[in-house]
Image (spheres, grey):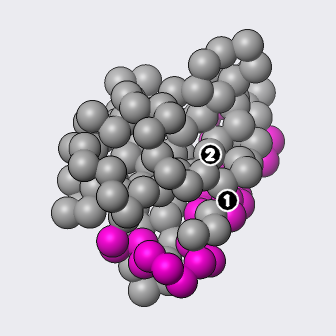
């Protein structure tokens, strides 16, 4: 499994970005894995942002509920994170994660931080005020 993120950049507060994570490996398809987005700001621990389980169930961090939407296109083997109404506190490196065997619900996986087997290298999101 190889996860490659894209879509990060610099935006002003209130703006939008859409992150994408392509699963370029052919061992496990996107629909066979629980997948999620995590972020880490300088000096802070990595935190869960959004997770989508194999059955489509989703979970979000309280700080992004109503502003971010996680989705996946199984035909394209791609995970997305639509981020609207961005705030300066959303500034961080965003990482895509996936696991074919993790037996957690979406909300459990959101708080797991390190349990996912596969991680991308990250894409930087910077929101200015």
Q: Is residue 79 magenta?
A: no
Residue that mark 1 sits on: 5
Q: Quadrant of the N terminus?
A: bottom right
- Residue for point 49% across, 80% down: 27
Q: Which residues are magenta?
A: 4-32
Q: Secondary structure at mark 1?
A: strand
Mark toward the start of the polypeptide (1 vs 2): 1
Where is residue 6? Give x, y as percent: 71, 60
Q: Quick check: 9 above or below 93?
A: below
Give the residue at the far top of this rendering: 43
> Which label sits on residue 17?
none
* Near-viewer residue (85 or 49): 49
Is residue 7 left or right of 21 when viewed as pictured?
right
Callout 2: SS: strand
Residue 91 appearing in the image: yes
Res. 8 in view:
no
Residue placed most toward the observer, 33 or 75 = 33
User: What's the residue at 62%, 45% (across, down)?
Assistant: 95
Quadrant containing the C terminus in the rendered view:
top right
Residues at marks 1 and 2, CA–CA distance in whole angstroms: 7 Å
Mark 2 highlights which residue? Answer: 95
- Verify whether residue 14 appears in magenta: yes
Question: Residue 74: which quarter of the image?
Answer: bottom left
Residue at 25% x, 44% y is 104
**Closer to the camera in the image, 37 or 102:** 102
Tags 1 and 2 touching, CB below 8 Å? yes
Residue 15: x, y in percent?
63, 42
Pointer 2 local density, CA inside 10 Å: few below 14, some 14–19, many at least 20: many
Q: Left or right of 19: which side holds 125?
A: right
Mark 1: few/some/many CA within 10 Å (<14, 14-19, 20+): many
């Amino acid at each position: 499994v190889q996860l490659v993120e894209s879509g990060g950049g610099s935006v002003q507060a209130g703006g939008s970005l859409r992150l994408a994570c392509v699963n370029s490996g052919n061992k496990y398809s996107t629909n066979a894995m629980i997948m999620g987005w995590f972020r880490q700001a300088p000096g802070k621990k990595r935190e869960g942002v959004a997770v989508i389980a194999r059955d489509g169930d989703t979970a979000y961090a309280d700080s992004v509920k109503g502003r971010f939407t996680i989705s996946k296109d199984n035909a394209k083997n791609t995970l997305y994170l639509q981020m609207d109404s961005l705030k300066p506190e959303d500034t961080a490196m965003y990482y895509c994660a996936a696991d074919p065997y993790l037996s957690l619900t979406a909300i459990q996986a959101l708080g797991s931080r390190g349990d996912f087997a596969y991680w991308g290298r990250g894409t930087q999101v910077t929101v200015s005020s």
